[in-house]
Every structure is written in structure tokens, then in C-alpha cells.
Image (cartoon, helix red, strand yellow):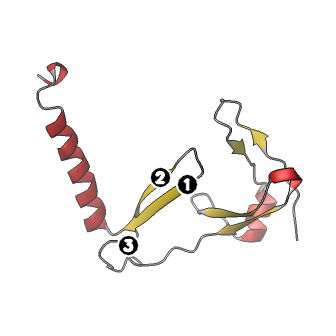
Amino acid sequence: MSWKLTCQDAADGSGDLILELPDDLLEAAGWKVGDILELEGDLANGGAIQLKKTVLCDVCDVCGAGTAETGHGVLQAQWRDGEHDGLRLCRGCFDYAMATLRREHELSHMFDEEGQ
């Protein structure tokens, strides 16, 4: 099966595109809300693309702990220049990252007038 879909401009000045996926496509592909999809191909000059579901590894990218039974957290960046990066983290590494970011923020704003 194949579907021909049209991308729509997000109309927010970002240059981002919106691609609405019909329910029959989601059902046929076995995709659900929350799945991570990757684009393959080239949209330039009307080129075609393929969407593929990303199969996540069941280990933490930092410590290597298994996450198959407990799940994982994701630290992800998608930059305007098209670059992207991310980490899948076990609960311990995710909690550590969140606590570290919060603590660093608190320390950097400790003496701000608004924080007094």
C-alpha cells in the first residue's frame, strides 16, 4: 500500500511543515501516537519521502542499563538548521540529568533580585 500526502506550511514563520497522517495509514503501518518516525528521501523538487518507525534500543545511551521493562526517558534536540541529537536514558540517568539541570539553574540564579 502507499499513500500520497501533502505537507502543509505551519504558517508560523518557522519554515516547518505539517504532515497529517490519516487513521487508515496509521492502522496499516501499526503506528500509534507517541511512536518516533524518521523521514527518508528528499522533498526538494517534489521528491518523495518514506516514513519509517524508529525502533528504540532497550539500553540507556549513558550507562548501558536495560530499559526494556522499565521504559526510558528521552533528552532530544531538533535545531532549526536541521541537525538533531538525542539520548535514551534509564530512570537513574534521566533523574540525574534533570536534578543536575535544576540545580545548575538554581545556582546560576541564586542572587537574582527576583529570586530573593
| In the rendered image, the vertical position of residue 44 relative to residue 89, given as above or below | above
SS under mark 3: loop
Q: Which residue is mark 3?
A: 61
Residue position for label 2: 77
Give the label on residue 83, or none. Answer: 1
Does 13 sit left or right of 8 as displayed? Answer: left
Q: Please state which amino acid type lies under the numbered disc 1.
A: Glu
Q: Position of residue 83 (x, y in %)?
A: 55, 54
Question: How far across and how far down the image is residue 47, in percent?
Answer: 85, 58
- Earlier-in-chain disc, 2 versus 3: 3
Q: Label 1 to label 3, Cα distance in Å?
A: 19 Å
Q: Disc 1 or disc 3, which is closer to the eye?
A: 1
Quadrant assignment for the C terminus? top left
Q: Is residue 49 left or right of residue 102?
A: right
Q: Pointer 2: residues within 10 angstroms few (<14), some, or many (20+)?
A: few
What amino acid type is highlighted by mark number 2? Ala
> Which quarter of the image is occupied by the N terminus?
bottom right
Report helix, strand or loop for mark 1.
loop
Q: Is residue 10 left or right of residue 70?
A: right
Dots 2, 1 in contact, CB < 8 A? yes
- Looking at this view, is 31 or 106 the one in front? 106
Q: Nearer the viewer, residue 3 or 107?
A: 107
Write down the quadrant of residue 106 in the picture: top left
